Image (cartoon, helix red, strand yellow):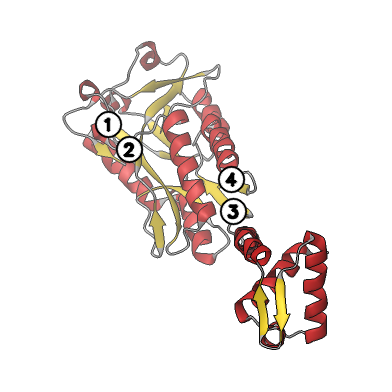
């Protein structure tokens, strides 16, 4: 016996207090409805209605069953709602992306945090530059992402802004690698390896502007995508460097923070405006926690210890 269906029939008869009217409402033949209620009575072992010419009146046992069945039916309705959200994609697979150089620890923490917060959900994660992410978010082929600012795209909503200090990647035998920090102006006379400008045009331009403000104008720009390729270029050329967050250590190169933290990347989650469903909100929360804990990011310069803040800072 389908208990939920029979309880729904029972509830309608109780509301109508008449088998004929309840049958019309349920679009059932009256004899069929009567048989279903009788089967429910046999299942419970009690009489649920007093039947007469005037209609059907709940017995004391019927009133008790009605009160208890309401909670069961409400729970079933909530379950149907959850399943409906799953079918609508709110609790299914979320298509998301992260930018290059985010760091393996941060990406792994993001995946773990998402699964912990959404056990029934799945995160389809890719690595895409900001420009690629904004194009896919606009096209509807991406549900959410982590982007770097400036992010000049209409129709997007953003999560909290986080800052990530940049340092310099050098050859391990570079004289500048001998100290604990590097002055940005000390890189004068060197070329700079950067991701192609097309990946994030506004960020690319702001990086170079910020470098000039702090005394470093690269002699040339070398396109370099991916950490391994960037490391290889730096190990092969003594006059080449790169600016990035702290990468995993590897023989042949050395990363040093910039004195006074003059440069930082600004990063946030992003999604199409008006489409911040449950899965997107879970992703944004998981990303914020992972980036703070595993990528050295902070919500605003004011969160840093006062002694670590320079007099001026150009946040990228």
**Of tags 3 and 4, which is closer to the observer?**
4
Q: Where is residue 138 in the image (x, y as percent from the top left)?
A: 49, 64
Classify 153 as above or below 199.
Answer: below
According to the image, label 1 marks what residue? Answer: 303
According to the image, label 2 marks what residue? Answer: 299
**The C terminus: image quadrant:** top left
Question: CA separation, marks 2 and 3?
Answer: 25 Å
Classify 306 as above or below 3.
Answer: above
Question: CA separation, marks 3 and 1?
Answer: 31 Å
The circle on residue 118 is 4
Residue 251 in view (yes/no): yes
In the rendered structure, which disc, 3 or 1, sits on the residue that comes first in sequence?
Answer: 3
Please state which of residues 224 and 237 is positioned toward the viewer in this rendering: 224
According to the image, label 3 marks what residue? Answer: 95
Please state which of residues 227 and 122 is positioned toward the viewer in this rendering: 122
The circle on residue 194 is none
Q: Do the residues labelled 4 and 1 touch (CB within 8 Å)?
A: no
Helix or strand or loop: what does disc 2 sit on?
loop
């Amino acid at each position: 016996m389908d208990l939920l269906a029979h309880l729904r029939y029972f509830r309608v008869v109780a509301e109508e207090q008449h088998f004929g009217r309840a049958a019309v409402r349920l679009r059932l033949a009256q004899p069929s409805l009567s048989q279903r209620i009788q089967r429910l009575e046999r299942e419970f072992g009690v009489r649920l209605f007093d039947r007469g010419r005037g209609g059907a009146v709940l017995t004391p046992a019927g009133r008790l069953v009605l009160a208890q069945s309401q909670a069961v039916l409400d729970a079933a309705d909530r379950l149907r709602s959850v399943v409906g959200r799953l079918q609508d994609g709110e609790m299914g697979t979320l298509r998301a992306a992260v930018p290059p150089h985010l760091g393996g620890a941060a990406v792994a923490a993001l995946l773990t945090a998402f699964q912990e917060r959404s056990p029934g959900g799945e995160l389809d994660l890719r690595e895409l530059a900001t420009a690629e992410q904004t194009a896919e978010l606009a096209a509807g082929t991406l549900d959410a992402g982590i982007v770097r600012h400036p992010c000049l795209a209409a129709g997007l909503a953003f999560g909290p802004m986080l800052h990530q200090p940049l340092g310099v990647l050098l050859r391990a035998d570079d004289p500048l690698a001998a100290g604990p920090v590097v002055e940005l102006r000390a890189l004068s006379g060197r070329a700079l390896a950067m991701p192609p400008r097309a990946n994030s045009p506004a960020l690319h331009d702001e990086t170079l502007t910020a470098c000039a403000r702090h005394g470093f104008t690269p002699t040339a720009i070398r396109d370099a995508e991916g950490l391994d390729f960037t490391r290889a270029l730096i190990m092969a050329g003594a006059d080449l460097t790169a600016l990035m967050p702290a990468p995993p250590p590897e023989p042949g190169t050395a990363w040093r923070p910039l004195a006074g933290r003059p440069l930082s990347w600004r990063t946030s989650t992003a999604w199409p405006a008006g489409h911040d469903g449950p899965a997107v909100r879970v992703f944004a929360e998981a990303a914020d926690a992972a980036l703070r804990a595993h990528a050295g990011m902070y919500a605003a310069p004011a969160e840093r210890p006062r002694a670590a803040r320079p007099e001026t800072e150009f946040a990228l």
